[in-house]
Image (spheres, rainbow, N blue to C red):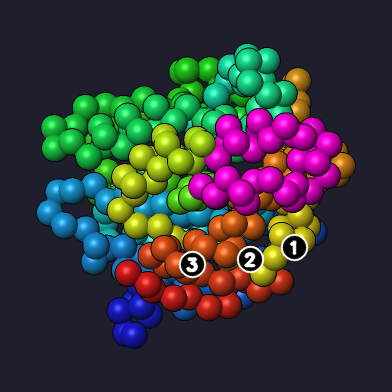
Amino acid sequence: MKNYSECFKVVKKDCFKFISSQETHAEKFKNKHEMVEKFLIPVCFWIARKIINNNTLIIGLSGGQGTGKTTTSSLIEIIIKKYFKLNVFKISIDDFYKTRNERISLSKKIHPLLKTRGVPGTHDINLMIDFFKRVKKSKFKTILLPRFDKSVDDRVEKKKWYKIKKKPDVVIFEGWCVGAKPQKNKELKKPINDLEKNYDQSLKWRKYVNNQLLTKYKKFNNMLDYLIYLKAENFKILRTWRLKQETKLSLNSKKKKNLKIMSKQEVLIFMMTYQRITESMFKYASKYASVLMNLNDRHLIKKIKFLK
């Protein structure tokens, strides 16, 4: 389409500058021209068409660990701002993690595995729901939202939090379990990996996480206007991509103190906490997502479907 080509000319410089900022000496983005013009620009046109009057549009963007959610959502933000001149606010579900002390307390009260950030139940879900309600109001008031620093596994000090002063036209809310749905109780019984087998023999952790999806997270997911889902080919490839992410985090955080950077073995164990929900989303998310982006084994978008 002609409009897509025109848009690409306008946003190309900013998009490629952002992509360069995400590259490392060992890891370079491939086919960035195609990714932006063929896939992400059409998504941005689709988003722009969904905006009605002064209503803030809330777009969920989901995908397994390492699928490129942050990069994809950041590029979408750049395109919508630059070409469509719309006010966009982007945030990750990761920023709403409970504090380290809150998770330690949760792990003592319910199950030791809840000390590990990630699964439903380890986020401040009430704060997320409150944010969605406030951002939708016609009379907008300044909103303060937390930032989470994975390198220290805790929130940053309050003076560094997000401050939204103007009502956004679009909110992009990205996260690995955004849009996830609960499983049936009988599906929880069989362990999916060694972590569940050895550390959750009573099913208490699995049932707690699943119940969170069934209750509070269901309410949160119902507040999304649309869901974009990045689908990888399998869980094995996500492990490879996630290990590369941790290496990059380590390189970018060398000057910080009290780091919580994970070793290879720690990353693999960490990902086991995500596996059940991630594999469930492999099966079912494509049935209820609004936009489906299929990724190949080289971390590239190979196909896109607009479902709603």
Q: Quadrant of residue 108?
A: top right
Q: Residues within 10 Å of mark 1 (few under 14, many from 20)?
A: some
Mark number, residue 267: none
Circle 2/circle 3 CB separation < 8 Å: no
**Vertical side of 306 occupied by 220: above or below:** above
Q: Which residue is mark 1?
A: 237
**Within the image, what quadrant is residue 165 found in?**
top left
Callout 3 crowding tier (Cα within 10 Å): few <14, some 14–19, many ≥20: many
Quadrant where the image shows the C terminus: bottom left
Residue shown at 70% from the left, 65% from the top: 234
Q: Nearer the viewer, mark 2 or mark 3?
A: 3
**Looking at the image, residue 9 lies above or below residue 23:** below
**Kind of residue at disc 3:** Ser
Instruction: Answer whether residue 211 is magenta in the image.
Output: no
Q: Range of the magenta residues?
A: 182-210
For marks 2 and 3, give the CA distance. Answer: 12 Å
| Residue 281 visible (yes or no) | yes
Give the residue number, with chain letter if any, for mark 3.
Answer: 286
Q: Would you say 254 lies left or right of 130 here?
A: right
Identity of the residue furthest to the bottom in this view? 1
Say which element carries label 2: loop
Mark 2 or 1 closer to N-term? 2
The answer to whether the residue labelled 2 contacts the one labelled 1, judged by CB atoms less than 8 Å apart, is yes
Residue 306, image x and y in percent?
38, 73
Q: Nearer the viewer, residue 299 or 108?
A: 108
**Closer to the camera in the image, 288 or 172:** 288
Q: Residue at x 57, y 64 (%)?
A: 283
Q: CA distance from mark 1 to mark 3?
A: 19 Å
Residue 232's disc is: 2
